[in-house]
Image (tube, rainbow, N blue to C red):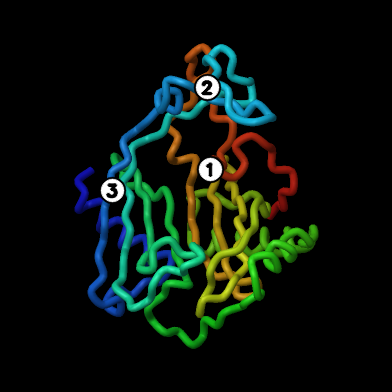
Amino acid sequence: MPKDEARQIGLDLLIQFFGVNFDQLGDYQVEMDYMPAFDLREISTTIYEFDGVDGRIPVENSEVPDIRWPMNVYRSTWHGTISVPTDRTPCPEGRMLRGSDLLRFRVDAQTGELIGLQFFPSEDPVTRPDMQSECMGSPIQVFEYRDNMTAQHNIEYANFAMQLAEEANIFEDEVLRAAYIFGGWMMGRDGSFELRIAVAVECVNGETVVLEFQGRNRKELVGVDFYSRMIDHAVDRDGNIVEPASQFVGFSSTSEITNWVYR
């Protein structure tokens, strides 16, 4: 797929999911990068495992622990970053890596299918009075809140995510179940520290998506990731094509989700 076509698809998706009004962003720039297909086994000639004491030890493919198999082979993707000029400088403590990043997207380089979207509320250059910050004071306070979340919080977030998935027609089939899988802090509006929650959602045909919400009360959609769409196939230790270990690469690649809430 040509770069310009992928660029337009990405911009349209940002409008669809986040309601972006590009007419309000001023002199924004769109940077496009191409990520070719790759096999995890070919990234390095040596695979390392932590030795549990003082460093990493190299291992041959035949010695890699079973938990590392199967390994995924990924599809080619186009990545886009929308940067908006501002007078803001990156935080000296390193909490913001790039002061102008606002929106990102990833699409399949062959089909144009949505892979992922990201939105950074802390870097919104347009004043929106109805989007107030929900500052928790510090990252530690956010982590403390996350660590004390209960089963009821899981039900709350799962139901919220399933309803959004249905309203946005994310899947072609009916939504089956959802579960809270990860939480942490992000810079929020007005430089605040806000809760950010990731929820896995699955439809009846097995397709999955991870939705991310920011702000404890407002639950603003800031991330959409179809991780399974990145995977072309997986291979076992002997090179045979097999099913991937998980549909949620990056969140639950080696552990099973057990806290599902059904629709």
**Camera-nearest residue between 165 and 59:** 59
Image spot of residue 254 (x, y percent) = 64, 34
Give the residue at x 38% y 68%. 99
Q: Quadrant of the N terminus?
A: top left
Sequence order check, earlier mark of 2 and 1: 1
Callout 3 secondary element: strand
Q: Is residue 246 above or below residue 177?
A: above
In the rendered structure, find residue 242 and report the number of the disc placed on it.
2
Q: Which residue is mark 1?
A: 207
Is 3 positioned to the left or the right of 241 in the image? left
Q: Badge 3 local density, few (<14 within 10 Å), some, or many (20+)?
A: few
In the image, which is nearer the foreground, mark 1 or mark 3?
3
Q: Vertical placement of 38 versus 118: above or below? A: above
Inter-mark Cα distance, 3 to 2? 29 Å
- Residue 57, percent from left and from top: 58, 22
Image coordinates of residue 256 in percent, x first then y, are: 69, 38
The image position of residue 90, as x and y in percent, is 41, 68
For marks 2 and 1, give the one nearer the viewer: 2
Q: Which residue is mark 3?
A: 33
Please, what is the three-letter code of the amino acid marked with disc 3?
Asp
Residue that protrudes farthest toward the bottom in the picture? 129
Which corner quadrant of the image does residue 141 belong to? bottom right
Query: Along the horizontal axis of the image, is 255 left or right of 80?
Result: right
Q: Amino acid at mark 2?
A: Val
Q: Secondary structure at mark 1?
A: loop
Amino acid type for the residue under numbered disc 1: Glu
